[in-house]
Amino acid sequence: MDNHSSGPVETGAQMDYAEHEKTYKGFLTLTKWGTMHLVVLMIAMAAGFFGGAGFFGALIIFLVLSAAGIYLLR
């Protein structure tokens, strides 16, 4: 089998592994940060709605936990 790719991409063109790794790293980073922010948002909403903290209490909880999450995930 030849190693050159003169045909369509579907039949064996070379992969750009550097670009693949860069995309995968970006996906993992976005997933990590997005999950952290969603968990912090859910905790703040639970404190605001069910814990009696109110809007400003939930906002403070969100900001404090977001800062802690950013510090820990770096």
Image: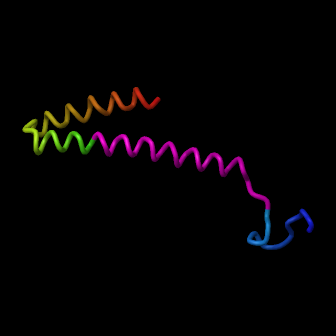
Say if the magenta span includes residue 43. Answer: no
Residue at 79%, 59% (x, y): give it.
14
Question: Is 32 placed above or below 6 here?
Answer: above
Residue at 39%, 31% (x, y): give it.
70
Q: Position of residue 20 (x, y in %)?
A: 66, 51
Say if the magenta span includes residue 25. Answer: yes
Question: Main SS type for the magenta part?
Answer: helix
34 sits to left or right of 2? left
The N terminus is located in which quarter?
A: bottom right
Q: Position of residue 57 (x, y in %)?
A: 14, 33
Q: Quadrant of residue 34?
A: top left
Residue range in magenta is 14-40
26 sits to left or right of 69? right
Residue at 83%, 73% (x, y): give it.
7
24 sits to left or right of 29? right
Q: Quadrant of residue 13?
A: bottom right
